[in-house]
Image (spheres, rainbow, N blue to C red):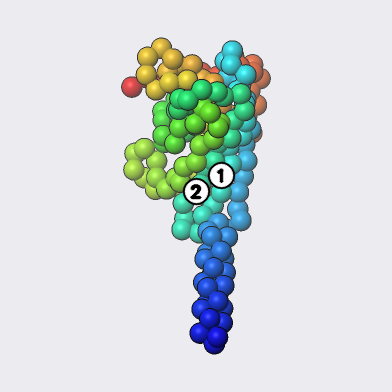
Amino acid sequence: MKMLSFVLVFSVLAWSCQENANTNEFTGNEVTYDLQPASQYDISGYVTMKEKRDGTTQVIVNLTGTSGNGNLPVHLHLGDITAADADVAALLSPVNAQTGKSETVLSQLANETSITYAELINLDACIKIHLSDVGPERDIILSGGNIGASVSRSIENGRIGFQPCKSE
């Protein structure tokens, strides 16, 4: 009986420690930016950036209006949403069109320089969700929005203000 009690108490403590480790993964610092429709498709949502204790940033994209079984490419671009031919700063995990969700742990940019949460939320940048990675559909931006330093700039022309990305 004593052994059973010991095993039960040990199991509860181990579960409790594991639960605390999961809840302590983040610092509590986070920011959310709106994503607005950028084409004839009515797709909008938001992107949330959460600071992790290990110095990385979890980037979570949530969209409404998506459908199908495909994946929608997500790019972090330098400059605001109206910048034509903006460089891709990072490729994020694609949005699952069925769920409208994407999660990426971001620790470095495409040029392999590291980036912290504080640097990311101060970066002059934007997020664009594309219809495809290839072909003419690559230039169709479904949704997007300014982040970091760019967020203070409004998009006066609405959907017209979105510019295509630099083709590589």
Q: Specify the label residue 49 is tagged with.
A: 1
Asked which secondary structure carries label 2, the reply is strand
Name above or below for residue 43 compared with residue 4.
above
**Which residue is depicted at the point 34% across and 43% down?**
112
Q: Quadrant of the N terminus?
A: bottom right
**Which residue is depicted at the point 34% across and 39% down?**
111
Q: Few, some or many C-alpha atoms within 10 Å of disc 2 (few <14, some 14-19, many ≥20)? A: many
Q: Specify the label residue 40 is tagged with.
A: none
Q: Is residue 122 rendered to the left or right of residue 165?
A: right
Q: Is residue 147 visible?
A: no
* Residue picked out by circle 2: 57
Residue 110: image location, x then y, percent: 36, 37
Amino acid of disc 2? Thr
**Which residue is depicted at the point 58% across and 35% down?**
62
Amino acid of disc 1? Met
Residue 114: image location, x then y, percent: 39, 48
| Residue situated in front as seen by the camera: 92 or 72 | 72
Q: Quadrant of the C terminus?
A: top left
Sequence-wise, the earlier of marks 1 and 2 is 1
**Which residue is depicted at the point 51% across and 47% down?**
58
